Image (tube, helix red, strand yellow):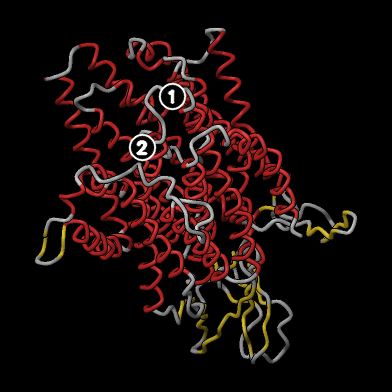
Amino acid sequence: MNIVVLVGIIVTLVTAVPVFNQMRKHPKGLHILFFAEMWERFSYYGMRGLLIFYLTQHFLFDDAFASSQYGTYTSLVYLLPLIGGFLADKYLGNRKAIAFGALLLVAGHMTMGIEGPEATQVMHHDGARYEFVTEGRGDTRQALIQVDGQGYSFSPNEAGDLVIADLPEGAPIPATLPQGSYELSVENRDRTYVSIFYLALALIVMGVGFLKANISSIVGQLYEENDPRRDGGFTLYYYGINLGSFWAAILCGYLGETVGWWAGFGLAGIGMFVGWVIFVRGRMMFFLPGKNLIGHVGNPPEPDALKKPMFGPINREWGIYALGLLGVVAVWFMLQAHALTGWMLIAGWVLFLGYMGYFIVTKASSVEGQRLILAIILIVVSVVFWTLFEQAGSSMNLFAARNTNLDISPSEFVNLGPLAVEMRITASQVQSFNAGFILIFAPVFAFLWAFLAKLQRNPNTPLKFALALIQVGLGFILLVWGVSFADDSYRVPLVFLAGAYLLHTTGELCLSPVGLSAITKLSPGTVVSFMMAGWFLSSSAAQYVGGLVAGMTATETVGGQVLDPGAALAGYASVFQTIGIFAIAIGIIVGLLSFALKRLGHGRAEDQMAIAGAAEAAGPDQDAHPKG
C-alpha cells in the first residue's frame, strides 16, 4: 500500500466520523448533494493534478505553453458558471442544469482517457536524425537519446553543451555537442488526438459552467430560511468537497503516474459518473427503487415555459441543451486562443470597473459608494492571493516532480505488521496536501474565529485578507529557503513543499470565509448580482494570470525531462522569491491600511460570522459558496 493512501485513510476516518454523525440530524437530501459534489470535485481535481504533466510529458509542449494552457483552461472553468447560473435561475432550475452539466463532465473526463500515441522528441545534428525514447511519468520521467539503436543518458556541462554519457568510440555523433550545433523538434504530435484533448477540456469547462454555480444553491433550498441547522449543513457539505479533492489527488494522481494517463483520467470519469447517477436518482442506493430525496428542490422557475417550442419541434429546455453543446464548440476554439481569453478578461474588467465607477458616482449614496470601493479593493486583493495560490496545479506541481525529493524513507518499502507500505509519494499526490490540511484545520479555524468573535477580537475583513497574502508569500519564501538544503540531484526535501502548502492553506482559511460573503454584504441590492459576477471574474482572472506567472518558471526540457535540473531549481527559486516578497509586501500594506479600510464598510462587512465563515472556508476553491 502507498504511504499517502494509508495516511489518507487515517485522516478520513478521524475527520469523517463526527461529520457523518452530524449528518444524521440534517435533511436526507443533504446526503445526496454531499456525495454528488464529492464525486464532482473528485473528478475535477483528479484531472487537474495530472494536467500539467500530461501537457509537458505526453504532448511534449514546452513549459511556457503548458502553463499558459493550464491558466486558460482554469480561467474558463471559473468564468462559465456566470452563464450556467443565469440559465438555471432564468429557465432550467438548479437540478436540470446540474444534471446536464454533470453529464458533460462525464463525457469530458472519459474523453481525456483517449490519449493516443505520445509525441516524440527528435534531435537533428549534421544532417542526421536522432530520436529520444522516454519512460515513466511525473517525477520518474526519464529520456534517453537513441544512437545506433541504443539509449544513452545525457546532461549539460558547465558551458551549456550537451554531453552524452557512455557513448562508445566510433559513434556517428560526438559525445559533446556544443550549443547551436544541434536542433530539437517534436514529431508525431498527432493533431487528431490534440483536438480530442481540447474537446475533452471544452466539455469539462461547459460542464462545470452548468454545475458549479448551482449545486451549492440547492443545499440552501433544503432548509427553511430560519432553520438553525442551515450553516451546519453547509459545513458538512463543504467537507464533502474537500474529501473529494483529497482522494482525487491521492488515487487519480497515483494511477496516472504509475499505470498510465488513461487510468488517472478514467478514474476521474468514473467518479463523475457515480456522482451524476446519485444526483439524478436522488438517493444513495441509486440501483434500488425509491423516493428521490431532492425532487422537491431546484426545480425550474416556470416549468411550463420550458415545454414551449423554441426551434420548430425543439422546446426551450432541449434548445438550451443544444446551445450548450454549441457552446462546447466555442470553448474548444477559445481554449486554443490563449490571448483571446486574456483580452476577454481585460474587456470584462474594463466593463466591470467602468460601470461600478459610474454607479458609485451617479447612483450610490455616500455610504454605499464607500462600501463598494472597499468591495472592489477586496476583489483586487483576492486576485493577487488566488494568482499565487493557484500555482499549486502548475509551477508548484512541476517543482514537485523536478526539484523535490519525494522519497519519505531511504527504504522503498517499510513493513507495518503484515502490511508493506510504499514509502514514496508521486508528484501529483502532493496536490492532496491542501485539501488534507483543510480537513484537519478547518475545524480549528472555525473554533478560532468563534472564540475571537466572543472576545470581540475577530480580525476585520481587510486584515484577514492581508494575513492571507502574507501567508501565501511566506509559503514561497519557505520554498526558497529549502533550496539551500537541496541534494546533489538538486532536489529539495519534501518537508519544505509540505510547509508551503500548509501556509497557503492557512492563508486560504483566512480569506475564504469572508470572501464572497463580504462582497454580498457590502453591495447594494441593485448591484449585488453584478458584484458577484465581478467576484467570479476576479477568480477567472487570477487563474489566467497564474498561468502567466507559472510560465516565468519555464525551463528547457527534452522528451519531457528537464535538461538541467540545477538551472531549473535556480529558476524556480528566483520566481518564487519574487512573488513571495511581492505578496508579503502587498499584505503588509493592506494590513497597515486595514483599519482605515474597515471604516469604508461602515460596519457592514464586520458581522461576527465566524461559524458560517468557517463553513465557507471549507472548500478548496473560494467560489464553492452557498451564494455562489
Instruction: Tell me which label, 1 or 2, sits earlier in the chain.
Output: 1
* x and y, in percent, of residue 435 in the image: 58, 43
Q: Are marks 1 and 2 in contact (CB under 8 Å)?
A: no
Q: Which residue is mark 2?
A: 628
* Residue extending furthest toward the right: 417
Residue at image point 63% right, 83% down: 174
**Is residue 59 positioned above or below 12 on the image?**
below
User: Does residue 573 appear anywhere in the picture?
Assistant: yes
Q: Could you tell me which secondary element the residue under label 2 belongs to?
A: loop
Is 406 in front, or is 267?
267
Task: Indicate the amino acid at tag 2.
Answer: Gly
Is 423 in front, or is 211?
211
* x and y, in percent, of residue 126 in the image: 51, 87
Q: Within 10 Å of the Cα at label 2, are there few (<14), some (14-19), or many (20+) other Cα atoms?
A: many
Q: Which residue is mark 1?
A: 227
* Residue extending furthest toward the top: 455
Task: Indicate the amino acid at tag 1.
Answer: Asp
Please name which of the two marks, 1 or 2, marks the residue nearer to the observer.
Answer: 1
* x and y, in percent, of residue 275 in the image: 48, 55
* Residue extending furthest toward the front: 290
**Is residue 159 positioned above or below 510 on the image?**
below
Q: Within 10 Å of the Cα at label 1, are there few (<14), some (14-19), or many (20+) other Cα atoms?
A: few
Image quarter (top left, top right, bottom left or bottom right) of the C terminus: top left
